Amino acid sequence: MSNKQPPPEPISRQPYQSPNQFWLLTRLPWIKEAGADDNPQAITTSQVSQAWVFAAGGMVLLGALLGNGPLFALGLFLGAALLVAWLWARYCLRNLTVQRRFSQPRAFYGEEITMSQVFTNNKPLPVPWLAVHDEYPGALEISSAAASASSKARVRTLVTTLSLGWYERVTRHYNVRCTARGEHTLGPVDLESGDVFGLFRRTQELATPQTLIVYPRYVPIEQLGITARQPFGDFKATQNLATDPLRLRTIREYAYGDNPRHIHWKASARRGQLQTKLFEPAATPQLFIYCNQDTFARIWEGLDPQSLELTITVAASLANYGLEEGYMVGLRVNSFSPHSDMQVKINPSRNPEQFTRILEALARVRGWSGAPMEELLEAERRNLPRGATLVVVTAVISDDMLNVLTAIRRAGHPVTLVDTVGSRRTVSQREVSSEALRSYGIDYYRIEAIGQAASIEKLTF
């Protein structure tokens, strides 16, 4: 799934042709523009620069008192140089833009993409030196020796130093390895620059938020002893799907409860017994995958990342398998969608983009801010389509959840419960009896990969 391309040049420079370049050349660089950030408090000085300022003032004062012309002129020259340096530092970050670009905004787990930093100096004043500190999530791996730890938790900093001429654009490229599922936000960017002598410095923070979505892992599923047309269990639902009377599948002996209108009279006359028609389903079977983001029975116990990643990997693998088997696959997660108070809900579909929607929704699951899974199941169990199949993937199993699943099974929906164990901390203290669940018609499977959620190669049920 990784599209490897030849690495681009690490640094590229090119002149930046502004449409108003000639007009800007006719203006002084220190003329303030409307809406520009002009905070003089952002300029910092050092003890060396303060000493030079006092020295220039002292030369001018002594030269005037003593009537020493050369000393007075030297003080004026030094003062003028310091003024130019101060103005240079004041306006060095004016019309300086920083952009961050990815070769693709979405990537698969383990894939390597390219990130480019584009620096544009759109003014006639060169930037002799520029120090850039770009923050990025520590879960991502950037192949650069300039990456260092940050003072913030789970955040690293990419340090870049360069110089920019007037109307110049510099681009630097880095390889990013996507080693963690999630919606990763990069930024802000801290800029620091100053005059050519380094006497005065100016700092500025740019928000530049940018998001990179890394899809979760999904692996092949091996079904041992289970037929291909019933991928999540061999129990047949008591309620059949709606049938198409124009698509005859086979005939069998008439049984009590069969529709009299479906009696095959010619076959009944030949065999001497009533025969009834069986038709092909009129609709594609629907599969609902319920992914439980909780890893402990009580929310205040915290979150186990390994169990959560294993649960999401299993849910993504089941969605991929269901779509390949011809199911209309939908997803429910007891987690709120980003920037919304609605829980993750993707209706069943066989659209070619359905798997991408499911992966993107699972990538955004963070393991907090949601309702218990048993409440979600209880709220939707009466609105499930007829004949829909349910697969619940969870790292924690409660009595309330089992009661709701039993009620759903009694309503005629095939139910499968997949118990995921990704860490020893989440091993359930109560034993779940697979025989007891199957007596209620619920298929139960246990996937145990303690500390190996990121390295499993296949799933076996």
Image (tube, rainbow, N blue to C red):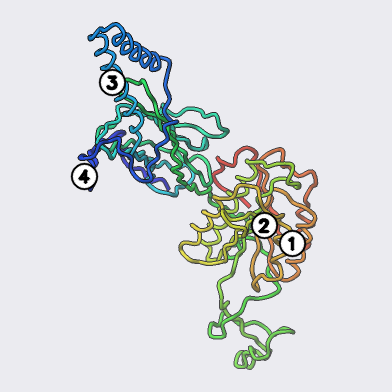
Name the amino acid type tagged 2: Val
Direction from residue 369 to residue 199 in the image, left or right: left
Distance from Cα at disc 3 to Cα at disc 1: 80 Å
Badge 3 marks a residue whose secondary structure is helix
* Image coords of residue 187 (percent x, y): 47, 39
Distance from Cα at disc 2 to Cα at disc 1: 9 Å
Q: Which dot marks residue 405?
A: 1
* Image coords of residue 18 (percent x, y): 24, 45
Distance from Cα at disc 3 to Cα at disc 4: 27 Å
Direction from residue 266 to residue 117 in the image, left or right: left
Local packing at callout 4 (Cα closer than 10 Å; few below 14, some 14-19, many 20+) is few
Q: Which residue is mark 3?
A: 81
Q: Which residue is mark 2?
A: 392
Name the amino acid type tagged 3: Ala
Mark 2 vs 1: CB contact within 8 A = yes
Q: Nearer the viewer, mark 2 or mark 4?
A: 4
* Image coords of residue 185 (percent x, y): 50, 43
In depth, the one of 233 and 314 nearer the eye is: 314
Q: Nearer the viewer, mark 3 or mark 4?
A: 3
In depth, the one of 372 and 98 nearer the eye is: 98
Q: How many marks?
A: 4
Q: Residue at x 67, y 47 (%)?
A: 420
Name the amino acid type tagged 4: Trp
Q: Closer to the N terminus: mark 2 or mark 4?
A: 4
Q: Residue at x 55, y 55 (%)?
A: 361
Badge 4 marks a residue whose secondary structure is helix
Name the amino acid type tagged 1: Leu
Vertical order, 120 against 199 (above or below): below
Local packing at callout 1 (Cα closer than 10 Å; few below 14, some 14-19, many 20+) is many
Q: Which residue is mark 4?
A: 23
